[in-house]
Amino acid sequence: MKRIGVTVFAFVLWMSLSATAQDTGAQQPAGSGQGTTTPAKEKGAKLQHLKGKISDDGKSFTTDKDNKTYTIENSDAVKGHEGHDVRLSGHVDPSASSIHVTSVKMAGEKASKDKTGAMSEQPPK
């Protein structure tokens, strides 16, 4: 009796795993078509932390490391940093040579303690 129960359990487990494996490719991400995810995330773009320079018009970013240029998908996120050397985080889509910026900081800014012991951003000297 135990042997039959174990066999049935193993068969059911095997069938559910094979059905899940086949179904995984057909599923769409939650919220697709509803505008809840950014275009870069829908394409499977990776979050990266990069150093480089934002163009004078704020529409592109060139990395310091390998001199690659990416189109900035959300140029409003880099407003005020046009033409500056920055450190930024964003979802990079290498196939489209684009980046969706999630955060940006001036390259020379360092966190330091002021006289009160609180952390503050200091401009480069």
Image: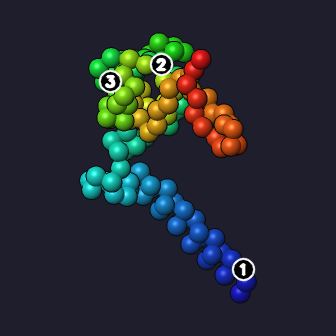
Amino acid of disc 3:
Gly
Which numbered disc covers residue 58?
A: 3
**Residue under numbered circle 1:** 3
Relative horizontal placement of residue 47, taking residue 122 as reference (left or right): left
Residue 113 x/y as whole percent: 68, 37
Cα distance between the residues tagged 3 and 2: 12 Å
Establish if 102 lies above or below 78: below
Q: Quadrant of the C terminus?
A: top right
Q: Position of residue 90 (x, y in %)?
A: 45, 35
Identify the residue shown where x is 69% and y is 38%. 115
Check disc 3: other Cα within 10 Å, few if <14, some if 14-19, many if 20+.
Answer: many
Disc 1 residue type (three-letter)? Arg
What residue is disc 2 on?
85
Q: Earlier in the sequence, mark 1 or mark 2?
A: 1
Q: Residue furthest front?
A: 115
Q: Secondary structure at mark 3?
A: loop
Relative placement, left or right, of 5 versus 34 is: right
Label 1 Cα neighbours within 10 Å, binned few <14 / some 14-19 / many ≥20: few
